[in-house]
Amino acid sequence: MTKHGILALGLCAICLAASLRPARAQGVADFYRGRTVTVVIGFSVGGGYDLYARLLARHLGRHIPGEPNVVPQNREGAGSERAVLYLYNAAPKDGTVIGTFSRSMAVAPLLDKAPFDATRFSWLGSISRDVSVCMTWHTSPIKTFDDMLAKPFTMGGLGKEADPDIFAMVLRNVFGAKLKLVSGYPGTNDATLAMERGEVNGVCGISWSTVKARHMDWIKASTVNLPVQFGLSREADIPDVPAVIDLVKGDEQTRMVRVILAGQAMARPYVAPPGIPADRRDALVAGFAATLKDPAFLADAQKLQVDVEPVTAAEIETLLAEVYATPKDIIAKAAKAIAN
């Protein structure tokens, strides 16, 4: 073949690739136009996950080709495992359903043999990074971390895969806290109401971002105590609250707790089911990222006092690859640490 012929073939290939890109984009737009995308929320109305998901739903549709309607749907139960299993097994795999659930669900297959593989989800990203806190009511005898080690107390939980239950078990099994867990509340909003009513002394695993958005009046009025925080780093807003990662002893305990806390780095995660068409997955990932930069979305977030510190889909996939490569003996000990 002559040089001219090779050049002509190369130009044809470039033109073909260029023509396919808009055709694919148009195909995605045609699919979504006039449709509804459902955002499944793994917790009840009124909590932090619900707040973030409803904020996202108000703005996401403008950034998906075809501008579909976006509707939130609460599917609470078992600490959001009900929502996870729906998204993994039963939800339509066509790009019309996405969802959010407890950040701890990402490592649940490792630590509790949950029946799904988190690496198979179509990860869209996270709205923020976060730390969580333990909170007790002002009438509770539990004011500090040392109180947790010295006095019997009760904490509210949502289900074995949810942060409040997991962190309560870490306190009991790793540090020896004299803790009794009362589980089964549909969401953290329900558990904090139980705390106010005196049914339990407090709740662990409440995101600091939720505290800022929903409960800063409690902090300002000293209506609640914050005995300890959970995260891979300290929250700058509460430097005097001790961090679990600083309280562990030795390399083995540190590695165990780091696995358990890995989900804190993707505080408000969103996924689509496994196996959705690649072009629609790409459109959802791009639309999610664009929404988090949208001035209207950011203005709404500011009004709601909601933190926006995006984590990309690629960052979550990298984090999960690292966590799933943790040695089996460390995983086994971490699993024992959160066992009820």
Image: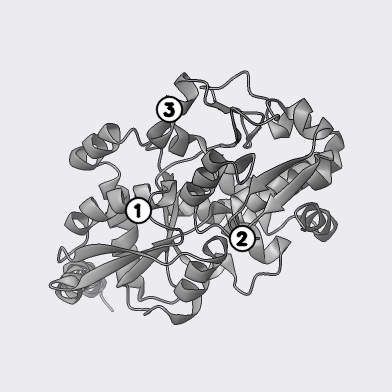
Q: In which quarter of the image is residue 147?
A: top right
Q: Which amino acid does label 1 sit on?
A: Ala
Q: Where is residue 109 in the image (x, y as percent from the top left)?
A: 66, 66
Q: Which amino acid does label 3 sit on?
A: Met
Residue where numbered disc 1 is placed: 53
In terms of sequence position, does the residue under pointer 3 or pointer 1 come before the other?
A: 1
Q: Residue at x 51, y 49 (%)?
A: 188
Taking the image as shown, residue 26 lies to the left or right of residue 146, namely left
Taking the image as shown, residue 311 lies to the left or right of residue 64, namely right
Q: In which quarter of the image is residue 15?
A: bottom left
- Callout in the foreground (3, 1): 3
Q: Quick one: 317 or 245, which is closer to the camera?
A: 245
Q: Which residue is drawn at 43% across and 27% down?
A: 216
Residue 4, can we see it? no
Secondary structure state at the residue bearing disc 1 = helix
Residue where numbered disc 3 is placed: 216
Q: Which amino acid does label 2 sit on?
A: Gly
Q: Which residue is drawn at 26% across and 48% down?
A: 291
Query: How many labels were placed on the picture?
Result: 3
Q: In this view, does 329 lie above or below 200?
A: below
Q: Position of residue 241 (x, y in %)?
A: 63, 23
Q: Could you classify mark 2 by the number of other residues whose Cα lies within 10 Å: few (under 14), some (14-19), or many (20 or more)? A: many
User: Are dots 2 and 3 in contact, CB under 8 Å?
Assistant: no
Q: Position of residue 108 (x, y in %)?
A: 65, 62
Q: Could you classify mark 1 by the number of other residues whose Cα lies within 10 Å: few (under 14), some (14-19), or many (20 or more)? A: many
Q: Give the CA separation, mark 2 to mark 3.
A: 26 Å
Secondary structure state at the residue bearing disc 3 = helix
**Quadrant housing the N terminus:** bottom left
Residue where numbered disc 2 is placed: 159
Taking the image as shown, residue 183 lies to the left or right of residue 296, namely right
Q: Could you classify mark 3 by the number of other residues whose Cα lies within 10 Å: few (under 14), some (14-19), or many (20 or more)? A: some
